Image: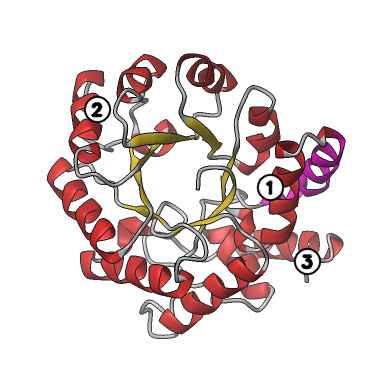
Amino acid sequence: MFRGTCTALVTPFDAAGNVDEAALRALVKRQIDLGIDGLVPVGTTGESPTLTHAEHDRVIEVVVEAAAGRVPVIAGAGSNSTAEALRLTRHAQEVGAAACLQVNPYYNKPSQEGLYRHFMAIADVGLPVVLYNIPGRTGVTLEPATIARLARHEKIVAVKEATGNLDFASQIVAETDLAVLSGDDSLTLPMAAVGGVGVISVISNLLPGRVKAMTAAFLGGDWEAARRLHLELFALFKAMFIETNPVPVKTAMELAGFCSAAVRLPLAPLADANRAKLEAMLRQHEVI
């Protein structure tokens, strides 16, 4: 469940701006057909901040239904309100998610003790927890010492490490038994060198087979193949952040014919100049 390539799924919208459930089901099918190891709906890439609570719940339900037990679904269920995170987690558990992704509480900037109590309360629900450490989005860092405390809870099983700090990853691997998953595509292979076991990937929305091949290579000990794939994909990894995620990846998905590029305000469509650059890069790499 917590190794290899898990896709941080985009949430497709239709022409009216509603969640496009048919497109979402098609995305899940394609991911599974191309060998992905897990699916992560309604995280950052899934635009959770602008989904209503009902939409958030429904996206998880659709992904669980469409996956039909063929791959684990790690449901985004975080919030800066512990009570809301508990509700989301209980719902994910009730509809059959295999685990939940829990982001650092954002905006209210809790202390390390507050973070500890927040995640422990969620873990007590009983659904396996993947911690999501992304200070660039949340304004607060979950320190390795706090992660080590949390790792004593049997339901806290993994961490999505998105600090960009390999020292953090090294310390977590050294001091805990948690599965460490990269939160940045470009750092998946470097993180694997210090003990990471996979990635929760943005670009695997577009290229699930190629990202899976890279993680399968290093997990199988073929570091030369993994390095080759990493370098082949590196420019595309970085292109997915030419503007705020998920704007570039949804644009790439539209250019490749998989779903609409539509995002919800306050996100805006990719700037024309960046769209042209992205399209040229996708053609260069024979993605479209």
Q: For residue 59, which quarter of the picture?
A: bottom left
Q: Earlier in the sequence, mark 3 or mark 1?
A: 1
Q: Which residue is mark 3?
A: 287
Mark 1 and mark 2 residues within 8 Å of each other at the beta carbon:
no
**Residue at the spot 69% in from the left edge and 44% down from the top edge:** 215
**Residue at the spot 19% in from the left edge and 38% down from the top edge:** 124
For the record, the magenta segment spans: 224-239
Crowd class of label 2 (few under 14; some 14 to 19; many from 20; radius 10 Å) = many
Measured as percent of width and height from the top left, residue 133 is found at 41, 33
Q: Decide: is 17 above or below 263.
A: below
Q: Which residue lies most toward the left here?
A: 83
Whether residue 5 is visible to the viewer of this picture, yes or no, is: yes
**Residue at the spot 32% in from the left edge and 22% down from the top edge:** 152
Which amino acid, by three-letter code, is at mark 1?
A: Phe
As drawn, the label of residue 115 is 2
Mark 3 and mark 2 residues within 8 Å of each other at the beta carbon:
no
Q: Which residue is mark 1?
A: 237
Which element type, helix, strand or loop, lies under badge 2?
helix
